[in-house]
Amino acid sequence: MRPPTPDAALSTSVIEPGTRLAGRYRLDDRVSEAGGSTFWKATDEILARSVAVLTFAPGFPRVNDVVTAARAASRLTDPRLTQVFDADDSGERAYVVSEWVTGETLEDLLAQGPMEADRAAAFLLEAAEALTSAHAAGLAHLCLTPHNLVWTSGGTVKITGLGVEAVLSGAESDTPALDDVQGLGAMLYAALTGHWPGGEGTVLPPAPSGADGLPLLPSQVRAGIPHNLDAITGRALGLAVRGAPERFDSPGAFADALAKVPRSPLPFVPLVGSTPPAVMPRPDSNPDGTAKMSPAASQPIPPVQTVPDSARMRPPQPPQPPQHSRAEMRSSGGSRGGGGQGSSNKALLAVVVVVVLVVVAVGGWAVSQMGGDDDNKNAKGGTQSSAAASPTPKVGELKVDRVLLDNDPPHVDTTAPRDLDKATDSSKSSYWTTQHYYGADFGGQRKGIGLVLDMGRTVTVDKVAVSMPDGTPGRVELRVGDSRKSSASQTQDTGDAVGNFDLTGKHVKGQYVTLWFSKLPSIGVFQVKVKDVTVYGTA
């Protein structure tokens, strides 16, 4: 939910900080007011988490419509859309409760200048896919501006204000799909150029226009923008682009086009304070022949091997005498007479080679005869072990393919899905955390929560090393199996969830390694906070 812009038409100051709604939502800070609605930062005292609350002045004319839109938005499950938790207009004080989104808006990010093209494409693809899911459920935004696209502190893209903002502003449309495509195109234009081709509602400078009064194409505003992104932006905004087909008719079509463009991978570098995430470097090649980065996936690619495998597997050869070019032979007096002597040497060498081959063949036959009895014995009774027996696999640190979450309803932990990758990034300063709870039993809201490590293949787990802050211990179970649901996995070990500790894997096999926290530790608050997890075993 985006804070309303300031407006003194109606005041809702009758509601003061400290007010509780529904006996659980404590209004902490008034963020902004606009036209009879107030945006608050609040606390859900039951789930001990920050939430955003929208309240309304007495007599606000569109209360029922706002609550209806919020309830419709609450049914959407795409995590890139702001979650609506509660909405009620049955009492004297109507309200809408949604997740509190922290991060930097597109407008904030562009204060540093336009984005690189591949990063802008990745950023807007996330937004387009989220709106595609909303339109599939019959909901449109209609009010997209750089304020509504957020790079969250958890390293994800989030769209705010779906449904609610259109009602608050009185926006209506007979072509909602086209309107949202135009909004997406305008944000892509802004990301590429730092200029806004829409109306008011942002501090970004307006886009330069041509003789026809329409915005110039991004490539006419900023050099180096690829033609495919130029064409996608133009098609979304209804600008003439040479060789481009007709306008997009839906956010889905816009998303499909962006999906074909080279993009920086998500997540970007996480935010530090108010610093925008940096663009990941994607060099095409390195002058020293070391690994280079793929434009599509930005994953290391080993240098091209110019020596065939058979040559690399040959044993080292003894030093060879220096070879001379024909020009060197001529300058040193080489002649046909000298060539005759070389021919004699070659003939003698050929005789020696033949003799050596004969000796080797005879020796090999003799050895095979001497070992015949043992070979027969092995064939009949199998009493001798093979010299080529496979060595025992060596236990070592295993690579985690991705980090998932076992976070079942009815009371989903809304903090836990963020920063999952920080549980395995080996950083001393980053953490994966859950939300705060009132009590080690999750405040009675759930039975536990699982941090699931997808190893990407079946592995044999020897142990799992976990690093957490010190405090009053909680309880954690190590579960391993071939299902990402921890309830379907085998419990291997149970330990105190606090500080640095190891859980034994008992050499069990499985693809998914789960830390199931059944009791919260107390680290000043009741919360799971994991600094690092390392899995040891054999692949």
Image: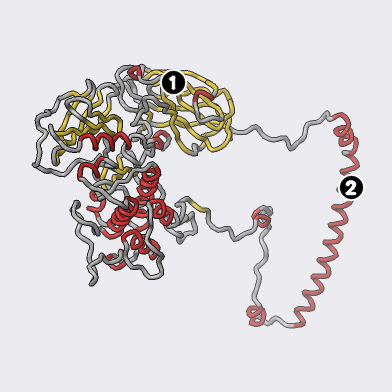
Identity of the residue drawn at 28% across and 60% down:
193
Nearer to us of marks 2 and 1 is: 1
Q: From the viewer's perspective, is 216 left or right of 510? A: left
The quadrant where residue 214 appears:
bottom left
| Residue bearing the label numbered 2 | 365
Q: Amino acid at mark 2?
A: Trp
- As measured in the structure, the alpha-carbon distance from the residue carrying label 2 to the one carrying label 1 is 65 Å
Q: Amino acid at mark 1?
A: Val
Exactly how many numbered labels are in the figure? Answer: 2
Relative image position of residue 129 (x, y in whole percent): 39, 47
Identity of the residue drawn at 9% across and 29% down:
14
| Residue bearing the label numbered 1 | 476
Q: From the viewer's perspective, is 491 left or right of 173? A: right
The quadrant the N terminus occupies is top left
Which one is in front, 138 or 105?
Answer: 138
> Where 220 sits versus 66, above or below?
below
Dot 2 and dot 1 residues touching (CB under 8 Å):
no
Identity of the residue drawn at 18% across and 54% down:
200
Relative image position of residue 329 (x, y in whole percent): 67, 79
Is residue 10 shown to the viewer in this render?
yes
Which one is in front, 532 or 153?
Answer: 153
